[in-house]
Amino acid sequence: MNFIFKEFFSKEILTEKLSKYNMFKRVFEFVKSNRLFVRAGSLCLVGMLAVGVSIVSVGITLGFRVNYEGSDIATVRNTGVFDAAKNIVLEHLESENADSVIKNPGFKMTLTVSDRLDTAMTLANAIVENTNDIVEASALIVNGECVACGEAEELKDRLEKHRTAFETEGGKNSSEFTENVTLQNGYYLKSEISDSDKIEAAIQSIGVKTVSVITMDMEIAFSRKTVKTAEKRIGYSEVTTVGQNGISRKTERVEMVNGEEISRTELSNEVIKEPVTEVKIVGTAKTTASAAQRSAERSAGFICPLKRGSFAVSSYYGDGRNHKGMDLAADKGTPIYAVAVGTVISSGYDKDYGYNVVIKHSNGLSTRYAHASTLCVENGETVSQGDVIAYVGSTGTSTGNHLHFEVMANGKRVNPISYIGLD
């Protein structure tokens, strides 16, 4: 016990303790005599501690503002983020010369909030947006080979137009490329974008197979049937049943490559509307007069106005165009004879009949001889049966040399055929 005590209160120990006591005494006396100064220092220290606590609590940190091509494009934690972003861009750029178009950035230290620091992916997008030589585009890959590069929507639209170019309008079509065609979207250098002509040439070189199922309605022409009847005069015709075309429906499968047909298969063919045959009634009778009537007409004693064998009947009375006489075609200058004795009541020119003669006979009968080239009688002259009264011609409304011969009974034009024995 004495040893420990002695050591504790040895001279050196006492001196050290007295020294510490004196230091605290002096500090105390300084604080006591400078209370205002000490209080201000304490406040500053407390303020600094409060600011530090605030900075830590809101996440304020040091960062670097990235200046690229004259514009601030991002704020990152350190400069290594730009290198990471550059690598991302290079990975997505379809070019061997991509590294040369990405410019070196500038960095400026700044205070920022941790939540506002940009990631490498965000910075990569900013690099692409601010590099004029980089564009977003699409590559046209045919059988694994890039044949053109251009704007994605334009390539898509052109490909679709080419794929459907050979489809049949109105048909059920299916078209596909004969080669493996894909579009690869990404970032490309402007210098690698193909011009319009190259893109079009590349697309046109792609083969297209088109299969079309085509249904067509086709007309079936109607047939014609002629029915002859002796109940109607020669020249009469009437359609009693109107002809109508039928319709057939055919379905075919057509296969084409680049618009060139390589096969055609008929799938069905059916008649959906039968054609209707046209029926025409044609008259064959030279006259429809009864036997008694014909006999009475012959009893008038008329001769033929032209020599038999010198003419041909070119048009009968009636003949479907309301023809009121008979046309006897003959050479120009063929003599025309009076069919019976009578008096010339008209001899001259008419715009329709041309040069013509009208002779009045007995029993209320009269005859007309039209389209003559020359007249041989005058008004009031009496003629005998067989006298030459004119010569065949084509005057007035006429389409050729002929005699238009009419018989009038009590002023009404009748069929002359029986009167001159041509029935």
Image (cartoon, rainbow, N blue to C red):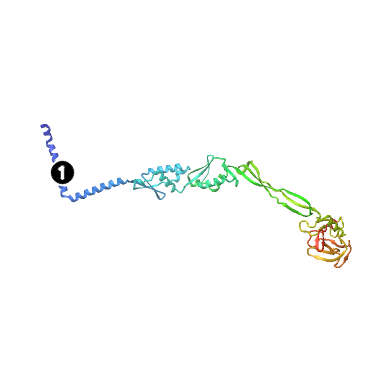
Q: Position of residue 253 (x, y in %)?
A: 62, 42
User: Three-letter amino acid code at disc 1?
Assistant: Phe
Horizontal side, residue 23 vs residue 149: left or right: left
Horizontal side, residue 368 vs residue 214: left or right: right
Horizontal side, residue 422 vs residue 35: left or right: right
Q: Is residue 275 above or below residue 402?
A: above
Q: Position of residue 153 (x, y in %)?
A: 51, 47
Q: Position of residue 122 (x, y in %)?
A: 41, 45
Q: Is residue 423 visible?
A: no
Q: Nearer the viewer, residue 185 or 134?
A: 185
Residue 298, image quadrant: bottom right
Residue 23, image quadrant: top left
* Residue lying furthest front: 292
Q: Nearer the viewer, residue 399 or 194?
A: 399
Label 1 sits on a secondary structure element that is helix
Q: Is residue 33 visible?
A: yes
Residue at 15% x, 49% y: name it: 33
Residue at 28% x, 46% y: name it: 53
Which residue matches tag 1?
24
Residue at 15% x, 48% y: name it: 32
Residue at 15% x, 41% y: name it: 20
Q: Residues within 10 Å of mark 1 (few under 14, many from 20)?
A: few
* Residue lying furthest left: 2
Numbered marks: total: 1
